[in-house]
Image (spheres, grey):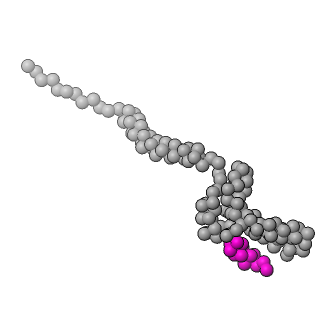
């Protein structure tokens, strides 16, 4: 009996390269696919782009009045009027900034209009009036 030697096939370098590419693609595509579906699900969950009172409260703790104003406009656009006092504070802050500009430039009619908006907003904000005082200090309003 003669023993046959098993011949080992030489691997083709092209096949080895393609195998390597497939393995690398698997390790790249898994995280990319995960991130894609993660952000897709977040977009579906938060598609309305609204800010509730807790988010607006968080903005106030960081003294981020610009985000408060932005949240007010986002809520108005989406027809949400739940956070009335926060919306009033945002309206007040915006009116104070415009009042300061108009007053310093000598546009008394426009400044008076903003002053009326400020007064109406102060009546609506309730417990948040302390933040309106901070806005007054920030813009140096008497």
Magenta-colored span: 129-142
> From the viewer's perspective, is 73 left or right of 47?
right
Vertical relation: 16 (above or below) 70: above
* Residue drawn at 38 percent across, 36 percent down: 19
Vertical relation: 54 (above or below) 3: below
Q: Main secondary structure of the magenta part?
A: helix
Instruction: Indicate the position of residue 65 as horizontal and vertical percent values.
Output: 68, 67
Confirm whether residue 54 shows in the render. yes
- State the quadrant of the C terminus: bottom right
Confirm whether residue 89 shows in the render. no
Residue furthest to the left:
1
Instruction: Indicate the position of residue 75 as horizontal and vertical percent values.
Output: 70, 54
* Residue drawn at 56 percent across, 44 percent down: 40
Closer to the camera, 53 or 12? 53
- State the quadrant of the N terminus: top left
Vertical relation: 120 (above or below) 142: above
Closer to the camera, 53 or 14? 53
Q: Residue 136 occupies which quadrant of the picture?
A: bottom right
Q: Residue 16 occupies which quadrant of the picture?
A: top left
Instruction: Indicate the position of residue 128 as horizontal and vertical percent values.
Output: 68, 69
Closer to the camera, 89 or 20? 89
* Residue drawn at 57 percent across, 46 percent down: 45
> From the viewer's perspective, is 137 left or right of 115?
left
* Residue drawn at 46 percent across, 46 percent down: 31
Q: How many marks?
A: 0
Instruction: Indicate the position of residue 103 as horizontal and vertical percent values.
Output: 86, 74
Magenta segment includes 39: no
């Amino acid at each position: 009996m003669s023993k046959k030697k098993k011949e080992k096939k030489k691997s083709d370098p092209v096949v080895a390269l393609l195998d390597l590419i497939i393995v690398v693609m698997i390790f790249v595509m898994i995280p990319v696919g995960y991130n894609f579906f993660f952000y897709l699900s977040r977009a579906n969950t938060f598609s309305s782009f609204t800010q509730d009172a807790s988010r607006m409260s968080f903005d106030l703790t960081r003294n981020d009045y610009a985000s408060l104003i932005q949240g007010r406009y986002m809520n108005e656009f989406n027809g949400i009027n739940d956070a009335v006092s926060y919306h009033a504070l945002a309206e007040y802050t915006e009116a104070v900034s415009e009042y300061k500009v108009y007053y310093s430039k000598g546009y008394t009619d426009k400044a008076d209009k903003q002053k009326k908006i400020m007064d109406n907003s102060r009546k609506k904000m309730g417990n948040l009036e302390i933040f309106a005082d901070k806005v007054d200090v920030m813009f140096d309003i008497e």
